[in-house]
Image (cartoon, rainbow, N blue to C red):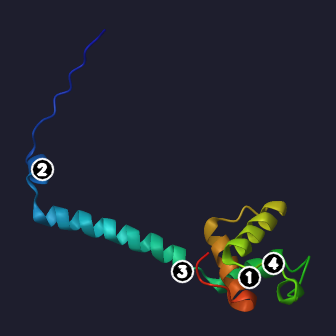
Amino acid sequence: MIEVKVARPESSQHRIMHEGDPSRWAMSLGMVASLALISSASALGADPSRGALLYENHCTGCHASQAHIREARKVQSRAELRRWILRWQSELRLEWSSEEVDDVEAFLNETYYRLDSTP
């Protein structure tokens, strides 16, 4: 067996990070908080107008709004709405991103369903 030793020079920057420099910790914490806000904003920030364009370009060829406003409609929750969107985008091989699915879901919910905001 060959043993390899790697020397780690003790730089002043390395010591600062380990000694708890408050400005570095604050900057790191701020970056983590920003990333969390961005990811939650994208989850909540669906774009219904983009969803309308996606829907009109890919879905209305097979059915119009009657599918969404009929008495015996199949969708009763946001989770079901999302499942139907995922099913048909897969059937049509659209390969939408999760953001595009979010956008179509937001469009359909705002326009037709008005279901609870939790998916």
Q: Quadrant of the N terminus?
A: top left
Kindly state the secondary structure of the residue where label 4 is placed. helix
Whole-angstrom CA distance, mark 3 to mark 1, is 16 Å
The residue that mark 4 highlights is 57
Q: Are the residues flagged by discs 2 and 4 in contact, CB closer than 8 Å?
A: no
Crowd rating for badge 3 (residues with CA inside 10 Å; few <14, some 14–19, many 20+): some
Kindly state the secondary structure of the residue where label 1 is placed. helix
Whole-angstrom CA distance, mark 4 to mark 1, is 6 Å
Labels 2 and 1: the sequence-earlier one: 2
Q: Residue 116 appears at what percent x and percent y?
A: 62, 84
Amino acid type of the residue tagged 1 in the rendering:
Leu
- Which disc number belongs to residue 18? 2
Q: Can you tell which of label 4 and label 3 is closer to the viewer?
A: 3
- Which disc number belongs to residue 53? 1
Labels 2 and 4: the sequence-earlier one: 2
Q: Residue 46 appears at what percent x and percent y?
A: 59, 79
